[in-house]
Amino acid sequence: MLSIRAFAVVLALGCLGTFVQAQPTYSREVSRIIQQKCQMCHRPGDIAPFALMNYDDARVQARAIRGAVDSRIMPPWKPIPGHGEFQHDLSLSDEDRQTILDWVDAGSPEGDPADLPPPVVYAEEWRLGPPDQIVSMPLPYVPIPREDRPDRYRCFVLPNVTDQDRWVRAVDIVPGQRQLVHHVLLYLTDDPDQIKLLKQFEDEDAEPGYDCWGGPRITPGAGPGLLKAAGGLLGAWVPGMAVSELPPSIGLLVPKGAYAIMQIHYHLDDGPATVADMTRLGLYFQKDPPKNRLLTLPLLNDQFVLKPGVEGQQVNMEFPLDLGAFGLPLPDAFVPKFSAIAVGPHMHQLGRKIRADLVQPDSTQVPLIEIDDWDFHWQGLYQFKDPVPLPYRSRITASCVFDNTTDHEVRWGESTNDEMCLVYIGFIAEGGLSWLLFGNPS
Ligand code: HEC
């Protein structure tokens, strides 16, 4: 028979178990969560307004941390779990969120400093080591808020990025002014007419670069292949998000002589900058030419009208993965095999929700991404953990939900007062006529 004493011990251990769980300490649990999910932004000189490097930092901010974590404002990772699986996911698990809440509610105990994890060592600059090529903004630029809008969106033209065709495996950005640079989008063009336009925009603007709010104001596209537009996106950078590296079998082509356009969002809440920004772009090349080219196409609806003063207006779009729908009824033997590699939803400031799904030929639905608290300040290009097969004759569907809180109709456009409903799909196309359509190496 189980003795009373043994029973008491089991009971005590049980209580101790709950006690340990209910009493997380900074040194044991919280410091580890902060290292993995907060510190990359909350460290001195980075984008977040305060650092979370040690117990005192966290204790002083404990109430604010509770609020931000409970309301899911922080960390600013937007995709809803279960709708696409992404690399470098910054979201908090329910368990970690509860640990933080319990820790604050218990009076933010420090615990035993001997339990602390070793500190994370952050790269001074380039997170993947020295890049194969560094391209800098041509001239330093001091961002000053415009009268009509506080933040500044500026495009810088980087001519002749590479001296030969290069296959890129990773792109990183080192902002000149970390506290100000809120996102960077990189486009490519090798089209002489578009390059002429870029030069015109620069000439018309007295300062370095030119103003560009919702996009580069040109039609990006580069490289061989009939669908040139699929080679127009070079990358996206958001503070705190890890650099995504492509596997050796995939590369992003920067053709010899192509121009890159670096769109920088400067966050100027604290007023005009006092020092100049000189943001740099680092390119990492594949050693050997890859089998497949990373391509990107926007899935978009540019025909919508949002009625004034109406919330919850939904805009839908759909892309049939069927070349026949584009007047190219290829026999199936010539059709490439498509897989999604990355996804990047994009709206402006009236956007509330956005999602994209794959509807397979047998009608089963695979969620690609869903965001239900859109924030224009935190948009990324999310790379899937594993490529998502896109069976031929599937459809990619997407929808945006807008609250038009203004007193006027809103339509598609690149300026602050316009809206967009767009999802970038990064993909590869293997075999078939992929070399002809997309300039795929094999
Ligand atoms: C990707 C960068 C990034 C990550 C990761 C991040 N933060 Fe933040 N945090 C910011 C920025 C930037 C702000 C300033 C407000 C803003 O721009 O949204 C902020 C603001 C805050 C605030 C103040 C919120 C307020 O209402 O003023 C708290 C508290 C906070 N973060 C806690 C955390 C915690 C805890 C984590 C990790 C669980 C975390 N943050 C992860 C960038 C980040």
Image (tube, rainbow, N blue to C red):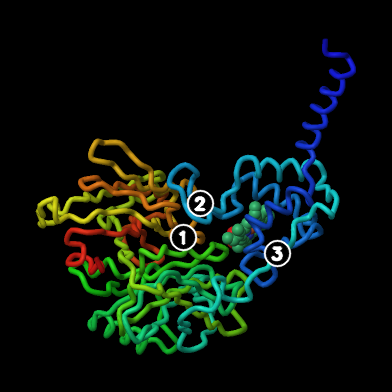
Q: Earlier in the sequence, mark 1 or mark 3?
A: 3
Image quadrant holding the N terminus, namely: top right
Identity of the residue drawn at 49% across and 45% down: 80
Q: Which residue is mark 3?
A: 50
Residue 121 location (% of width, % of height): 68, 68
Q: Secondary structure at mark 3?
A: loop
Element type where label 2 sits in the image: loop
Is 429 on the left or on the right of 386, as rendered?
left
The residues bearing labels 2 and 3 have C-alpha atoms spaced at a distance of 21 Å
Q: Is mark 1 within 8 Å of ligand 1?
A: no
413 vs 68, left or right, is: left
For residue 213, say whether it is visible. no
Whether disc 3's CB lies below 8 Å from ligand 1 is answered yes
Q: Nearer the viewer, residue 402 or 386?
A: 386
Q: Earlier in the sequence, mark 1 or mark 2?
A: 2
Please name the residue that numbered disc 2 is placed on.
78
User: Which residue position holds label 1?
Assistant: 380
In percent of width and height, residue 190 lies at 27, 80
The residue under label 3 is which amino acid type?
Phe
